Image (cartoon, rainbow, N blue to C red):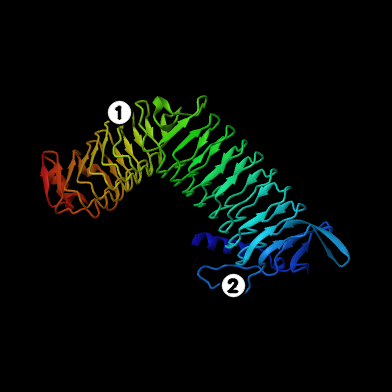
């Protein structure tokens, strides 16, 4: 969250004009700016309070305790209606506990209650149509009633708050990126019937969220939308969904059941595979520890099995030709994997962080092994490299400090494009490199390969 605070401080200091640090008048201890119509006012702050990174607490605490904003306010003989809350109006007020906003208010500005750490309750006005960006980000809010006219919950609106249960009204059609991210205590989410889009990381790191029912109206699920929702056990993708971003369900460690509703023209869960398959490309886009790979799948997509703890083995069928970026990243219980001869490409960090992996056999059709493909798989003892390899990217096998043997089937090792430090941190004195008959001399003079002390033809 440190980077988040820096971003907010930069945003506020860079975009607020000097005039906005003042107010037109003060009444009842509250500050107001007269709007252009001359009839209404915006509730604002007296002095903006910024929390700088690692700085001491500000000397001023701004609005404190329980605040009740009036519907009208009188100044110099004129009665004004309060119709808006200024952006950052309460932000970083460390002693603010509750705020009651009158029905006359129609809009609330960005970051209005951001970093109000002791804030517990806010009564929102019924005319509100949007929960703005960063509205309650990093605040202490633990319950909220979202008005029935709200159509959009903007990015970071409730990021890193103490919410335990949220009901999204049927009026809402869009939930912005990271809107509820890091709401670690949220156990229940009642999603409205008309939500069409769930933004990137919208519910990421909601580690206590146990279940979520996606509405039939849903069309799009953004990248990492439910990343590290580690208590969710099952999820069903509605028939209308046409877009699911990379890593939408990654690191959902408790997930045991994934299904796609019948009638979905973009995705399916063929053969009861407990995974989401993009129908037209036969690509697995999301999976869990109970997933199987159907024999019709041709690609294991980016981050498909990312963080599937509890999965000790996986059968990759001969139909698969490509293993995507981070496809099995951090599958910490995976013990062995055999890449079939059908696979042509293993992309970046495909098996990185698979701490329990003991052996790897790479088939004879694999041409390229991506950056960090097996990075820090520090329990691997043996690796077999297929004969068709033409490219091994940087750090592909870095950190395999338990490796005792590498068997290479590559005949012309001089033609292989090698990235930097492919075998970095492997004990090349203790690890034996086995090569095809008649090729040892080429390996002994080839960059990186020649660092192996024991090169044996077999």
Going by the image, does 326 lie left or right of 379?
Answer: right
Q: Nearer the viewer, residue 269 or 410?
A: 269
Residue for point 52% across, 49% down:
186
Res 87 visible: no
- Closer to us: mark 2 or mark 1? 2
| SS assignment at label 2 | loop
Residue for point 71% across, 48% down:
128
Q: Counting other residues with Cα less than 10 Å from the Cα at mark 2, is it few (<14), some (14-19), or many (20 or more)?
A: some
Give residue 383's position: percent from left, percent from top.
Answer: 21, 43
Going by the image, does 455 lie left or right of 281?
Answer: left
Q: Earlier in the sequence, mark 2 or mark 1?
A: 2
Rounded to the nearest angstrom, the CA distance separating label 2 from label 1 is: 63 Å
Give residue 96's position: percent from left, percent from top.
Answer: 63, 64
Give residue 135's position: percent from left, percent from top.
Answer: 62, 55
- Quick check: 84 above or below 197? below
Picture quadrant of residue 301: top left
Residue for point 74% across, 66% down:
30
Using the image, tell me which numbered label, if any, was put on residue 149: none
Res 321 visible: yes
| SS assignment at label 1 | loop
Residue for point 25% across, 50% down:
378
Picture quadrant of residue 342: top left
Give residue 201's position: percent from left, percent from top.
Answer: 51, 47
Where is mark 2, residue-wise? 58
Going by the image, does 234 lie left or right of 128?
Answer: left
Q: Are marks 2 and 1 in contact (CB under 8 Å)?
A: no
Using the image, tell me which numbered label, if any, was put on residue 318: 1
């Amino acid at each position: 969250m440190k980077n988040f605070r820096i971003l907010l401080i930069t945003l506020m200091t860079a975009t607020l004009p000097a005039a906005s640090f003042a107010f037109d008048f003060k009444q009842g201890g509250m500050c107001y700016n007269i709007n252009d119509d001359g009839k209404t006012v915006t509730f604002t702050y007296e002095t903006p309070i910024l929390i700088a990174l690692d700085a001491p607490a500000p000397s001023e605490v701004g609005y404190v305790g329980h605040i009740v904003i009036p519907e009208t306010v009188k100044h110099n003989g004129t009665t004004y209606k309060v119709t808006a809350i200024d952006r950052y109006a309460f932000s970083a007020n460390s002693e603010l506990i509750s705020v009651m906003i009158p029905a006359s208010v129609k809009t609330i500005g960005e970051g209005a209650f951001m970093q109000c750490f002791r804030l517990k309750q806010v009564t929102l006005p019924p005319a509100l149509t949007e929960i703005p960006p960063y509205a309650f980000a990093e605040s202490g809010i633990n319950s909220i009633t979202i008005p029935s006219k709200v159509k959009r919950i903007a990015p970071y609106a409730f990021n890193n708050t103490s919410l335990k249960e949220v009901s999204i009204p049927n009026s809402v059609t869009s939930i912005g990126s990271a809107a509820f991210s890091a709401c670690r205590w949220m156990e229940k989410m009642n999603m409205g019937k008309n939500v069409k889009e769930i933004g990137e990381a919208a519910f990421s790191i909601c580690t206590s969220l146990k279940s979520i029912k996606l509405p039939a109206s849903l069309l799009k699920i953004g990248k990492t939308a439910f990343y590290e929702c580690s208590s969710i056990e099952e999820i069903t993708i509605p028939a209308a969904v046409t877009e699911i971003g990379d890593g939408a369900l990654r690191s959902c460690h408790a997930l045991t059941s994934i299904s796609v509703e019948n009638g979905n023209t973009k995705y399916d869960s063929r053969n009861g595979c407990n995974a989401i398959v993009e129908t037209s490309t036969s690509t697995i886009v999301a999976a869990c520890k109970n997933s199987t790979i159907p024999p019709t799948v041709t690609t294991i997509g980016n981050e498909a099995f990312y963080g599937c703890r509890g999965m000790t083995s996986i059968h990759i069928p001969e139909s698969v030709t490509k293993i995507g970026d981070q496809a099995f990243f951090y599958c910490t219980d995976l013990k062995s994997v055999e890449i079939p001869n059908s696979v042509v490409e293993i992309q970046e960090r495909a098996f990185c962080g698979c701490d329990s992996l003991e052996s790897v056999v790479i088939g004879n059709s694999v041409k390229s092994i991506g950056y960090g493909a097996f990075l820090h798989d520090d329990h691997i003892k043996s690796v077999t490299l297929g004969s068709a390899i033409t490219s091994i990217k940087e750090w592909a096998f870095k950190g395999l400090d338990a490796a005792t043997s590498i068997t290479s089937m590559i005949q012309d090792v001089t033609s292989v494009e090698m990235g930097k430090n492919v075998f970095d941190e492997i004990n090349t004195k203790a690890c034996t490199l086995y090569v095809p008959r008649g090729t040892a001399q080429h390996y002994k003079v080839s960059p990186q390969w020649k660092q192996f002390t024991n090169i044996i033809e077999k």
